[in-house]
Image: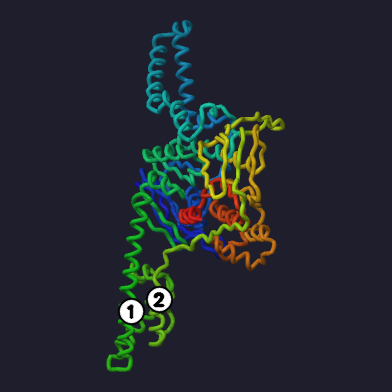
Amino acid sequence: MSLITANSLSKSFGAEDLFANISFSVAKGARLALVGPNGIGKTTLLRILIGEEEPSSGTVTRTKSLRVGYLPQEADFELRGTLWDVCLEPFVELIRMHGELEKLESEMSDPVKREYSEEYLRQALDRYGTLQHNFEERGGYVYQIRIKQVLTGLGFDPSDFEMSLDHLSGGQRTRAHLARLLLSNPDLLLLDEPTNHLDIRAVEWLEGYLSQWDGAAVVVSHDRYFLDHACNALLEMAISGAEYYRGNYTTYLNERENRWQHRVEVFESEREKLMRDVEYIKKNISGQNVQQAKGKLRRLTRVVQAIEQVGMDAVVSTNWSQLDVDTTTSPFSVEEAERRVRGLRPPQRVMPDLGLHLRSTHRSGDLVIRTKNLQIGYSDDIERGIPGKLLFRAPDIELRRADCAALIGPNGAGKSTFLKTILGQLGPLAGEVILGASLHVGYFAQAHEGLDPEKTVLDEILAQAPGMLPHQGRDYLGKYLFSGDDAFKRVSMLSGGERGRLALAKLALQDTNLLLLDEPTNHLDIPSQEILQSV
């Protein structure tokens, strides 16, 4: 039975279509991944499913009393109290039942109350037995264990459990919200890039948790390994619609290739048939079979116009009466018919690639970074009343030109803080960072702090390259998959992936010879991740 069904959903912003004609359903036990290029509208689709946004057309049908849990990309929700308090929220009824059990226990053990009638004691015992059974059935004796398991699985240390949410980072708040969602056990989970703020161990834990999930989930993620382990179906989104695939991400890649080969074969076969019709028309348009030739020409005109408007796939697989095409013009001439058939092109499957190119015209010295007795962390914030914290003591490090080092570790270990210390944005608690000669540092910030939400995409690029003209800026942005009016979008309106591409576009305009990249693949679609890796 389907928990939620989307029927012919479309979404437009003004004259620009985000996506159109998307239909699918999600049943209990389904773990559906939404995949597609950045900016195709995956987050918007999730918001439509939960009812936070309206589609331009189409409908969403939900089962009665459907309980939905939604994790957005960014921590824009209000959470109060401590981390433990937030995780207790799904268990309010169990906490109430526990309080009632304690009250009954107290009453039945009170000598004064025991002087009441046997009928009172019998009723109290019956009430206690029923309440205790329900409490146990609903997990009353294990819910605190569950909270600890989920928080630990998502990378929180027991020392964090009583931490005020005011002191948590954006990533930690997102994980806190995810923990609360999992503990609330909804019928349907909608997760928008849930792995972005998780370390490797936490991602593996979430994979295992979702694989055993007895509800349903719809997941947006650009982590192909996570999708392989956590999902059992995929919906590939495109502007014109969506295709459904059973299986995990690897199965999807293989099946997509098979479907593509079939489409190419169908296209070639159908175009050959049309060319045979053209040859028949040329041969007979002036002969004794002129009526048959004219009939074929009228039919060929309609078919070619339909293919040009909606593609070969739709014409071959859809009843003619259901095609939304305009074929009201007069028949082609014979010459025009041949030209139009020869001009038919096979369907395009490859999205334009990210045109990332990083340049370095200045050679650095052989020594790039050296640290001595370095201690990383935060000093006391007296104004906000937040005590300082030592995150880690770094062994003495030496990086030389052409080295490529990965900085790994659990969330909260201080990886971003380490990069900011190298940049000089934060001072070390002890020790020193020594930078080599002739360094030009390029920094990719995890939260894209270098982008101004009030500026347009084009403004950001022109500010980075003052000598660049607006038309040159738009051409340059095209390499980073910003086309048409995308250049005039405000940064605040961009998706996470679009902000990532804009940050990379700005980084590529800098003449750098040392790159500090903090989670550069977050939000990037999988093809863009692979290009970044190769660069």
Whether residue 490 is visible here, answered yes or no, is no
Helix, strand or loop for disc 1: helix
Residue at the extreme right: 383
Between 112 and 431, the residue placed more toward the observer is: 431
Residue type beneath disc 1: Leu
Helix, strand or loop for disc 2: loop
Distance between mark 1 and mark 2 Cα atoms? 10 Å
Residue at the extreme left: 288
Residue at the extreme front: 366
In the image, residue 374 above or below residue 365: above
Mark number displayed over residue 394? none
Q: Which residue is drawn at 60% across and 45% down?
A: 367
In the image, residue 245 above or below residue 86: below
Q: Name the residue under label 2.
A: 344
Q: Which residue is drawn at 33% across and 57% down?
A: 255
Q: Mark 1 points at which residue?
A: 274
How far across and down, in percent of the image, does residue 162 sit?
Answer: 56, 27
In the image, residue 49 above or below residue 351: above
How far across and down, in percent of the image, does residue 32 sit?
Answer: 40, 48
Between 513 and 100, the residue placed more toward the observer is: 513
Between 359 and 420, the residue placed more toward the observer is: 359
Q: Quadrant of residue 348?
A: bottom left
Between 136 and 266, the residue placed more toward the observer is: 266
Tell me which numbered mark, 1 or 2, is placed earlier along the sequence. Answer: 1
Residue at the extreme bottom: 287
Question: Pointer 1 and pointer 2: residues touching (CB < 8 Å)?
Answer: yes
How far across and down, in percent of the image, does residue 203 sit?
Answer: 45, 40
Q: How crowded is mark 1: few (under 14 residues within 10 Å), some or many (20 or more)?
A: many
How far across and down, in percent of the image, does residue 372 sit?
Answer: 62, 35
Residue type beneath disc 2: Leu
What color scheme is it? rainbow
Q: Which residue is drawn at 48% across and 16% down?
A: 103
